[in-house]
Image (cartoon, grey):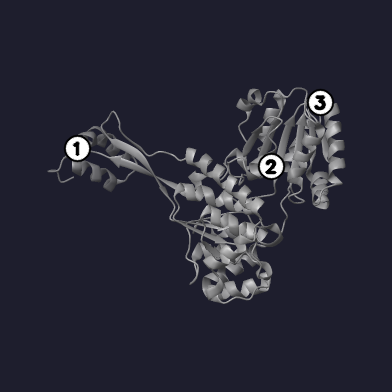
Amino acid sequence: MAVRLDHASPRFDAEFAALLGVKRELQLRVDEAVAAIIDDVRTRGDAALLDYTTKFDRCRLSADRLRLTEGEIAEAARRCPATVVSSLETAATRIRDYYARLMPADLDYRDAAGLRLGALWRPLAAAGIYVPGGAAAYPSSVLMNAVPAAVAGVERLAMVVPTPDGALNPAVMKAAQIAGVTEIYRVGGAQAVAALAFGTASIAPVDKIVGPGNAYVAAAKRQVFGNVGIDMIAGPSEILVIADAGNDPAWVAMDLLSQAEHDETAQSILITDDAGFADAVAQAVASALKGLKRRDIATASWERYGAIIRVERLAEAAALANRLAPEHLELAIADPDALLPAIRNAGAVFLGRHTPEAIGDYIAGPSHVLPTGRSARYASGLGVHDFLKRMSLIACDAESLGRLGPTAIALAEAEGLDAHARSIAIRLNPRSDA
């Protein structure tokens, strides 16, 4: 059963600390295997990709078939049901609109000392998008990764997706079309990450790799970071629901299970100020589990990592939420805006009883690629800023350099950097031998 905690208990601090400290990631020893795959791809290029694709995806290819043709993409996309196509188009439109509003403006001004200062935003030249394949194919993730990149102005979007037994997922291909991705390779795993990071004869390297994957993909992203940028290392899914007794227990139970069904290491937590409501939600979870297609996964998640926490007052929930720093936070209370100012750490916040987390997974607008494992304490969800670089702009004329130069010279000399100081001084007195 999910753990039950009471904020009023003298044991609460220790029990809550234990909840925070639980390790949910699968402790797989994959680093050595991933390092070997990366080295192999760097050494043998396409030949290594083809061997791994045959081995892991049961798909035998030649180098000229690694990249999908426009015809292959179009043919697969045509098999996507019309209702799914319409839903993907609506989602993409909403995502584009949201991130267009978040695009930063360049800054250019002259300060009191006479210096011209500013900041210029420039898109990455190329981004690689990793998309899971097979049974774990998520067309929504294609949109959530590719659309912000396109809005940012990234010219080249290279998508990699494994195709077990050679099968292409129609919804994934349609989502790629809608997002404007035309460069798609049928390769996955650590080998795909290596190809995007270092390049092969068929796949040119990118500047940044984004998108979710299994433990091998996560390990590969860690190992190539520095040679290429990455979005984040995504851990198991998580949700925190802060709810009062005005909710329907069945609604809250289903919201908790919406993350529990992702995988056995997902975590779902409820904080409420009503003990009777807590009991009702626990019963509703038990009832709802019986009818889920992914019942075994959701049950394992809820029983191993789920929690229900009772507080005396809902105001106490904010401090607990900030310590949990959840990927998803629902404020399913009568006045969510009253509690919102106290929330500092969350990947995304869902306000009110009619805003289930799942609306953010698909259609709301903000990307569902969010920080996990308490990393919302210092990280944000994926967005246009992840595909942009900010360049500082500095311009002096003789007058402004004369005002600030002596101060800079003093600092350079204090650090023992003579050439730094002289590079300024020589401009302040052109006839000097300084």
**In the figure, is residue 77 to the left or right of 103?**
right
Residue at the disc numbered 3: 274
Where residue 359 sits: x, y (%)?
A: 66, 40
N-terminal-most mark, 2 or 1:
2
**In the figure, is residue 241 to the left or right of 397?**
right
**Among the 4 quarters of the image, the one containing residue 132:** bottom right
N-terminal-most mark, 3 or 2:
3
Q: Is residue 122 above or below residue 206?
A: above
Residue at x 56% of width, y 47% of height: 92
* Foreground disc of the pair 1, 3: 3
Where residue 148 sits: x, y (%)?
A: 52, 47
Residue at the disc numbered 2: 358
Secondary element under disc 2, as helix, strand or loop, is helix
> What's the residue type where badge 3 is placed?
Asp
Secondary element under disc 3, as helix, strand or loop, is loop
Which quadrant does the C terminus fall into? top left
Q: What is the distance, in whole Å, between disc 1 and disc 3 at their CAs?
A: 69 Å
Farthest left residue in view: 431
* Foreground disc of the pair 3, 2: 2
Residue at the disc numbered 1: 398
Res 68 seen here = no
> What's the residue type where badge 1 is placed?
Ala
Residue at x 65% of width, y 34% of height: 350
Categorize mark 2 by other alpha carbons within 10 Å: few (<14), some (14-19), many (20+): some
